[in-house]
Image: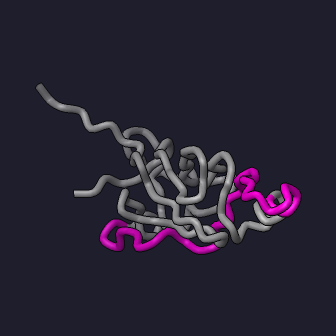
Amino acid sequence: MPLHVCTGATLACTFGAAPSVFNATPRPVLVQQRPLGVVMDHVPLLNILPFGVCTAPANPMVIAATAAALGAPTPAPCLPATPAPWLPGVPSVLVGQLPALDELCSLTCQWGGVIRVVFAGQVIQQIP
């Protein structure tokens, strides 16, 4: 069964050079004392932090850096552009009428990257 995503989860982007951290919008529903994420937690620099540098060929900053390097592919600082919600969400778990996130959800950056959950932010504790 997939884990629900909460603040502190680790994210990866197909065009990002480094992992990032997910920040759920504060709400009263908690998982291990951390806010639970929902599909609308896709706001750049609030919910989705940068992934180091970006290598997406459609990113205008990468295009400019590559042009300045006389055509040599050149990464540029990542600034996530995520205008649409996470998909598919978990419609059977609603938080304030919004589907929750689980580790199978993904988010698309308008520059072509796909953002996925690497670590849901929960620590599963074994009972001896």
Magenta segment includes 70:
yes
Overall secondary structure of the magenta section:
loop
Query: Where does residue 73 sit, x and y in percent of width and height?
Result: 72, 58
Instruction: Determine the image quadrant of residue 88.
Output: bottom left
Magenta segment includes 84:
yes
Which is nearer the eye, 21 or 77?
77
Query: What colour scheme governs how the chains and residues are painted in the rendered image of this protein?
Result: one colour
The answer to whether residue 40 is left or right of residue 78 is: left
The residue at the point 75 percent across, 50 percent down is 77
Query: Where does residue 5 sit, x and y in percent of width and height?
Result: 41, 53
Image quadrant holding the C terminus, namely top left
Asked if residue 28 can be seen in this view, the reply is: yes
Image quadrant holding the N terminus, namely bottom left
Query: Where does residue 10 sit, x and y in percent of width and height?
Result: 48, 45
The residue at the point 36 percent across, 42 percent down is 122
Residue extent of the magenta highlight: 66-93
The answer to whether residue 9 is left or right of residue 127 is: right
Query: Where does residue 6 sit, x and y in percent of width and height?
Result: 45, 49
Vertical relation: 112 (above or below) 68? below
Which is nearer the eye, 83 or 113?
113
Which is nearer the eye, 80 or 36?
80
Instruction: Determine the image quadrant of residue 69.
Output: bottom right
Q: Residue furthest top?
A: 128
Which is nearer the eye, 64 or 30?
64
